[in-house]
Amino acid sequence: MSSSRIRLLLFDIDGTLITKDKIKTKLMNGVQLIKAMESKFQTKLQNHPNDISKLQFAGGTDQSIAFDVLKHVNFIDEKSYKNPSAELVKKVDEACRDSGFGLKSTIEHGDYVYKRLPMVNELLERLAVKDKNCRIALLTGNYAVNAKLKLQGADISTNYFQFDKTAKSCKKLELDNQCDPAAFSSSNTRFIGSFGSDSRVRRELPPIACNRFKEILGHDNFDAIIIGDTPKDIDCAHFNGLKAVGVATGPFSTEELLAAGADRVLESFEDLDKTVDCLLAEF
């Protein structure tokens, strides 16, 4: 890697940094979002005749998952799915935000179903100190509040994804009022990246993350690399002219990620030296 050019590593969360704990199988994927949607739209989604468990959530944003579910159970038609009204978008957004309360309660009651993948904390710590020209951030379909809760619930330090921004006035990230857009976490630090709360469309997330990082740096002398476990992570990288590293720790195999066009693929992060070399080497 060039001694002057910074490498920004944008990590997905679900399936990349965390995985479902097979011991805790009583909750389905996305259950808090589904419950929030049931409440917001006053309709039954779980155990619906059109089984939503057959939907592929991997790689989706919270909003895209919500719209996919509503269309799957025929709550909305194709027209509303493709061109939703402002009222529908507002209700979906509110449901996505409300899901954070359920997620927080689940964590507090010890029913959180995700755990940290092997060597994740070691990898993040190594990257934070390995090279002065390397920075790590997030690119996830989760709403920012939920992203923070998920990481904390899996004992992953959010400090790795925070940047000092003392020169700007920052809001405090509070679950109570769902203050979300740039995921501020204190008056002096910023939880940076891009999130499902920024856009329903995953392809729109990389430019948002890069623009926020550019604002922090004060220049654009950096290369962004996206690390994720699904073809959608790869697609959003390549759509924006970025490189993508697939990691086969989610529902897709090494072969499937390569077939989807990943520039590099890791089986996992367990070989720490190999992982760091892969992420920091020239493409």
Image (tube, helix red, strand yellow):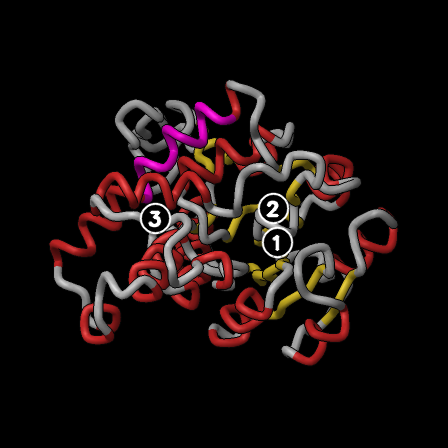
Taking depth in this image into account, of 2 and 103 the one nearest to the observer is: 103
Q: Quadrant of the C terminus?
A: bottom right
- Asked whether the beta carbons under mark 3 and mark 2 sit within 8 Å of each other, the answer is no
N-terminal-most mark, 3 or 2 = 2
Span of residues in magenta: 96-106
Label disc, if present, on residue 197 of the rendered structure? 3
* Label 3 element class: loop
Quadrant assignment, res 21: top right
Drawn side of residue 20 relative to residue 185, left or right: right
Is 98 drawn above or below residue 230 in the view shown?
A: above
Q: Which mark is residue 136?
A: 2
Pointer 1 with pointer 2, Cβ within 8 A: yes
Question: What is the number of the mark on residue 261?
Answer: none
Q: Which mark is residue 9?
A: 1
Q: Residues within 10 Å of mark 1 (few under 14, many from 20)?
A: many
Magenta stretch contains residue 201:
no
Q: Secondary structure at mark 2?
A: strand
Query: Along the polypeptide, which appears first: circle 1 or circle 2?
Result: 1
Q: CA distance from mark 3 to mark 2?
A: 20 Å
